[in-house]
Amino acid sequence: MTHNPTRNILFLMTDQHSVSTLGCYGNPTVETPALDRLAATGTCFTDAFTPTAICTPARASLLTGAAPFRHRLLANYERNVGYLEDLAPDQFTFAEALGGAGWNLGLIGKWHGGVRRNAADYGFEGPDLQGWHNPVDHPDYLAYLAEHDLPGYRISEPIRGVTPNGGPGNLMAARLHQPVEATFEHYLATRTIEMMERFAAQDRPFYLAAHFFGPHLPYLLPPEYFDRYDPDEMELPVSATEETFEDKPSVQRNYSALWAHDTLDEATTRKLIAAYWGYVSLVDHELGRILDALDRLGLAGDTAVAMTADHGEFTGAHRLHDKGPAMYDEIYRIPALLRVPGAPAGQRRDEFVTLMDFTATILDLAGLPAVDAADGTSLLPLARGEAPPWRDRMLAEFHGHHFPYPQRMLRTRTHKLIVNPESTNELYDLRADPHELVNRIGDPELAPVRRALMADLYARLRDRGDNFYHWMTPMFEIGGADHDATLSAFET
């Protein structure tokens, strides 16, 4: 289907954002009016997934439209374990494609996309905000505070557990002694609106991204949001109390200890959930300011608006926090909203969507070849209410954080298979066990499912060129090898 390119694109991105915290995804308590309004006026994709639940590789996949094994930027630089630290110079990116087509490009907020190349190297305007958390010592943020006579950053009441060696755990939440107007989130929204106003005055289409560092840990919030939700009313995730790690890779128990979950009492866990929800509401408030500015400037009629996140967050689920080498839906499912001028409003689509689909969608909206997003498919047909052929299962991968740890996942509507070469594989029956508590990889009853998923995962990895399949060839029932894995050539 042909269409006229959209004049502008506004791309809203959050970090470590669980779908369980959004009203439009079914949470009746958390206040997310801005994102709920965006969903009501566009399309909500209910089954969207990240290709990998770690910041830098996921963001590189959005930039390139390529799965991590393909773009090869596999780890956050803060915990890099010997992988590449920047994309290859000849790697395709949607930014360079849009810039070459004459678009203005702006990115306000989190980059986290490499060490030697920053957002400006790809053509984006905006302050250079490096790192994984709010850089509250950045000169532009300090100038913003001074310009508006606002107080600086200060926290109290820190929440942290105790690590296995008896030391203090990671900072998880604290009270921020600033008004909302002084928060880094408000600063990001303000700078985004300022750039939008400047772009609107120019006779060029624009792509403007607002990448919030939140609601990523630690949850550092002003009283209005730190105290917004009553901890006593927080419902603990089922897996927070029922996870035993029985018959699961031992790394999950290790990660639980790293984040000191079992050293926190139930009241503290409830407070962390309440603070996380508060952070979600703070970010939503600032996203609402950006969307209101789009309306005020008269741009909504010819501007596509997208919203997503790089990955989810555990917040106590499976006795875990943050993210890591455990491929549960809590961190692999992501919010995905898209509003396209002229497309139907209020749609809910349950197709399997991936972060790289947004890359293809950006290119498609700009009238550029979406095929350059190698592992993505444009969402425009879905947003327009069409029913094109679509994928019926999801692939995901992980390469490590703190240490190398390769994983591959194949997920269908009913089952999830995870291959962990270092220990035990995982198989979950998502119908009988939606919280992914019982690993049934060795259950004879599910042996036909295991064999079918293993063969399918093998074929998909082989066909896309992910050499992880070499490990699978001699180790699992993969339906017959199509190459010599035994080195028998040396016998002739």
Image (cartoon, helix red, strand yellow):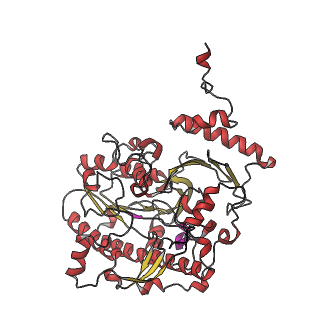
Q: Nearer the viewer, residue 347 or 38?
A: 38
- The quarter in which the C terminus is drawn is top right
> Is residue 211 shown left or right of residue 19?
left
For this orientation, the residue located farthest to the right is 445
Residue at the front extreme of this rendering: 165
Where residue 303 appears, x then y in whole percent? 33, 62
Boundaries of the magenta span: 12-25
Relative horizontal placement of residue 426, taking residue 82 as reference (left or right): right
Q: Residue at x 35, y 74 (%)?
A: 185
Q: How many marks?
A: 0
Q: Nearer the viewer, residue 205 or 413?
A: 413
Tell me: 72 left or right of 233.
Answer: left
Q: Is residue 216 above or below residue 365?
A: below
Which quadrant of the structure image shows residue 434? bottom right
Residue in the picture at 29% in, 66% down: 299
Q: Residue at x 63, y 78 (%)?
A: 235
- Looking at the image, residue 478 lies above or below residue 117: above
Residue 72 x %, y %: 42, 44
Q: Is residue 294 magenta?
A: no
Does the stretch in magenta take in 19? yes
Could you say where residue 329 lies in the image, as x and y percent from the top left? 59, 60
* Of residues 19 and 467, the one drawn nearer to the viewer in this rendering: 467
Say if residue 67 shows up in the picture. Answer: no
Decide: is 155 above or below 107. Answer: below
* Residue 1: quadrant of the picture: top left
Give whichever of 355, 142 is nearer the camera.
Answer: 142
Pinpoint residue 289: horizontal percent, then vertical percent. 34, 76
| Res 294 seen here | yes
> Viewed as shown, does residue 243 lie left or right of 222?
right
